[in-house]
Image: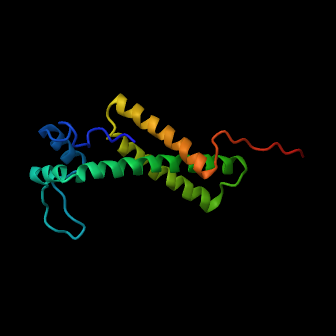
Amino acid sequence: MRLLHGLSSKGTVFGNEATKRRIKAKFDIPSYTTINGEAPCEVRDEDIDAAISNGNIDRMNMLLSAAHLLNCEANNLVEEASDLMAENGLLLGDLKKLHNDFVRVADKYFKEFATLVTTDTAKMDMFSDLDGFDKSFRKWAKVPSDWKSKEVKQ
């Protein structure tokens, strides 16, 4: 599994000042208020440096990368199932509404996550990882991608 571009502490990608500013801006870190209404505070460069030094940034990167692959796979499976339901007139009522809600939220998630994958190489790596994961997962789950409906004579 490849890591998210720009979040790894390897090399100078994460450690330079421009990247720290980008991280703070991306996640709205410079000025936030907690849900308890505590006073605004700022994450210091020392805090980011400590998270890099103790390995938390690399661990976060691995967790987010793995979660993203799982989310992509789950989204693809839900879409495949919904296509079959729609094709057979079964995507109705609350199920259709909930599916549409899911699709809207998933679209927001994938749009936001795409901002972390900034280079063509990283994008191709991500799709390659997803393709390999999809093949392995479908084999394990016994849901082949080349499945076809049975022809039913009426």
x, y percent for residue 148: 72, 41
x, y percent for residue 7: 26, 43
* Residue under the point 64% across and 44% down: 144
Q: How is the image coloured?
A: rainbow
x, y percent for residue 133: 50, 43
Above or below for 22 versus 122: below
x, y percent for residue 54: 18, 54
* Residue under the point 24% across and 50% down: 57
Question: Which quadrant of the figure has residue 56?
Answer: bottom left
Q: Is residue 104 left or right of residue 57?
A: right
Q: Is residue 58 left or right of residue 47?
A: right
Above or below for 153 versus 12: below
Taking the view exactly as shown, the residue that stands out farthest to the top is 120
* Residue under the point 45% across and 39% down: 129
The answer to whether any part of residue 79 appears in the image is: no
Above or below for 106 versus 131: below
Taking the view exactly as shown, the residue that stands out farthest to the bottom is 36
The answer to whether any part of residue 119 appears in the image is: yes
Question: Which quadrant of the figure has residue 4?
Answer: top left
Q: How many marks?
A: 0
